[in-house]
Image (cartoon, helix red, strand yellow):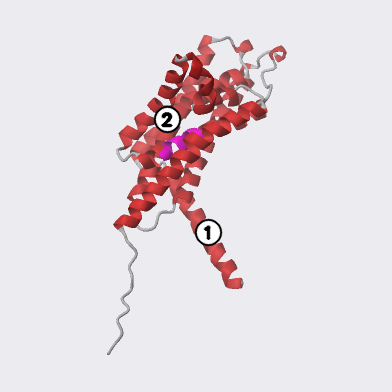
């Protein structure tokens, strides 16, 4: 019993180290550092655009969060694509969970950074209290984190399914927005937009309180674009790994 507990502890420690390694790898190279800088600058630029377009008395946490989190969510999946590429190139047995946890951690940090930008802008501007600028701030901040984590799962999933990173980068934008546009173009399919594409769920998560129906739609999107893509990607990766490295069957020749 004690040995089992020790083994479980070692496995958990090793998994934690691998997750931290995935977080470090997300900014380990110069291009990835530039990607991180571009992602954060996108959020700052969106906040500045709101500052130019609207007077500060009209600012609210919800009005700022939409553009800020939305701008950063375009680039966040690129981290997932790159980390998935690292996983595909790794030798030995496939352990996807630590990499996925590391990718989600990076996305959560981006979401918190976006919430911080919005909070700082409101504090500095001191908007009129009549506009309830801080209304539903906790819900919207949590929604921003969920938006980035969902976007990151799209990146890891498509990164596992597509070998060229550039193709996966484009797919993280073209596929969800393309499906959203196609469904919106046909009136009979328009209600399916909120169930099958991420964009409506992003708007809901960053607007304030979520109704049970809104949560159900977001969960459906998460199953399709998050869990579904990654499940298929990891399954194909394990199958390829097994094909490239078949288990060795020890010979059972007896001595004569």
> Dot 1: few (<14), some (14–19), or many (≥20) neighbours within 10 Å?
few
- Part of the protein shown in magenta: 150-157
> Where is the N terminus found, in terms of image quarters?
bottom right
- Helix, strand or loop at mark 1: helix
Tell me residue 195's x, y (percent). 54, 27
Say if residue 9 shows up in the picture: yes
Q: Furthest-bottom residue in view? A: 256
How far apart are the two marked residues, 1 and 2, measured between alpha carbons? 31 Å
Labels 1 and 2: the sequence-earlier one? 1
Q: Residue at x 53, y 63 (%)?
A: 10
Q: Residue at x 31, y 76 (%)?
A: 251
Say if residue 106 shows up in the picture: no
Q: Residue at x 64, y 27 (%)?
A: 213
The residue that disc 1 covers is 13
The residue that disc 2 covers is 75
Q: In the image shown, does 117 or 25 lie closer to the viewer?
A: 25
- The chief SS type of the magenta part is helix
In the rendered image, residue 155 lying in the magenta stretch gets the answer yes
Q: Is residue 77 left or right of residue 163?
A: right
Q: In the image shown, does 3 or 233 lie closer to the viewer?
A: 233
Up-down: is 88 above or below 111? below
Q: Residue at x 61, y 72 (%)?
A: 2
> Where is the C terminus found, in terms of image quarters?
bottom left
Tell me residue 243's x, y (percent). 31, 56
Q: Furthest-right residue in view? A: 130
Up-down: is 249 above or below 78? below
């Amino acid at each position: 019993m004690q040995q089992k507990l020790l083994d479980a502890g070692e496995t958990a420690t090793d998994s934690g180290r691998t997750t931290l390694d995935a977080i470090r790898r997300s900014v380990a190279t110069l291009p990835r550092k530039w990607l991180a800088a571009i992602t954060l600058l996108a959020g700052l630029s969106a906040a500045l655009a709101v500052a130019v377009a609207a007077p500060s008395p009209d600012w609210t946490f919800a009005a700022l969060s939409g553009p800020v989190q939305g701008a950063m969510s375009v680039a966040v999946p690129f981290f997932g694509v790159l980390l998935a590429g690292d996983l595909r190139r790794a030798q030995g047995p496939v352990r996807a969970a630590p990499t996925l946890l590391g990718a989600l951690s990076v996305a959560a940090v981006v979401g918190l950074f976006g919430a911080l930008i919005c909070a700082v802008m409101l504090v500095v501007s001191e908007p009129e209290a009549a506009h309830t600028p801080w209304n539903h701030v906790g819900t919207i901040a949590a929604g921003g984190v969920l938006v980035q984590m969902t976007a990151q799962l799209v990146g890891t999933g498509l990164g596992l399914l597509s070998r060229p990173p550039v193709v996966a980068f484009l797919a993280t934008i073209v596929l969800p927005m393309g499906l959203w546009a196609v469904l919106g173009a046909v009136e009979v399919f328009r209600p399916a937009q909120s169930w099958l594409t991420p964009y409506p769920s992003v708007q809901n998560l960053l607007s304030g309180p979520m109704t049970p129906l809104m949560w159900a739609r977001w969960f459906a999107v998460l199953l399709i674009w998050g869990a579904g893509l990654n499940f298929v990607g990891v399954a194909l990766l394990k199958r390829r790994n097994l094909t490239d490295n078949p288990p060795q069957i020890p010979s059972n020749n007896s001595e004569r």
